[in-house]
Amino acid sequence: MARAQDHGPEWLSGYTAAALRAELGQALRDLAGRVPTAAAEAATEFETAVLLYEREGTGRLRGHVNALIGVADARTLLADAAGASEALRAACTLAVRLRSRHTEERLREVVSRARQRFPRDPALRELTDRLRDPVPGAVPIPVAALPVQAFTRT
């Protein structure tokens, strides 16, 4: 895959196509607050970023996790509980390998929004239950990624 360093200034050397798609997804997600139709485009950009990060390998884990969080956020805006839940599960599974307060805060925000939007969704409920009460031998998920409300049973 061509990198920015092949065609641009030195400061762009670490910027990949995946990062570009994730940035575009974030801009469209932000725009979706005013133009709701932009949420679908945001989801597409974030999903493309996830695929590109998967091809790049583990060297860009933070970007990969943030793109998954973006997918979940866009899917929440689109009222797609299953898509949001699936992306959050993948983001949580990968996030345990990071030490990033910013990523944990972003994950916490999106989990909270998804839970508010889909309070009775069984997959989100199972995810937050698993985060609250981990099963021995299961893939760990950072508890810091949960909103405080996840620790209260409803």
Image: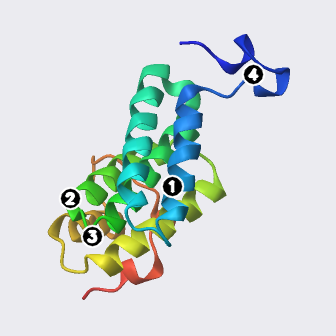
Give SS at disc 2: helix
Tell me the residue that label 2 is attached to.
82
Which one is nearer the viewer's eye here, 151 or 79?
79
Mark 1 or 2, which is nearer the eye? Answer: 1
Mark 1 or 3, which is nearer the eye? Answer: 1
Q: Determine contact: label 4, label 2, CB under 8 Å.
A: no
- Does residue 52 lie above or below 150 as drawn? above
Near mark 2 (Cα within 10 A), the count class, few <14, some 14-19 or many ≥20, is some
Near mark 1 (Cα within 10 A), the count class, few <14, some 14-19 or many ≥20, is many
- Does residue 57 lie above or below 111 as drawn? above
Q: Compute the Cα span from label 4 to label 1.
A: 24 Å
| Picture residue at 37% right of the left edge, 44% below the top | 44
Mark 3 or 2, which is nearer the eye? Answer: 2
Tell me the residue that label 3 is attached to.
129
**Extreme-right residue of the structure:** 10
Q: Mark 3 belongs to which amino acid?
A: Asp
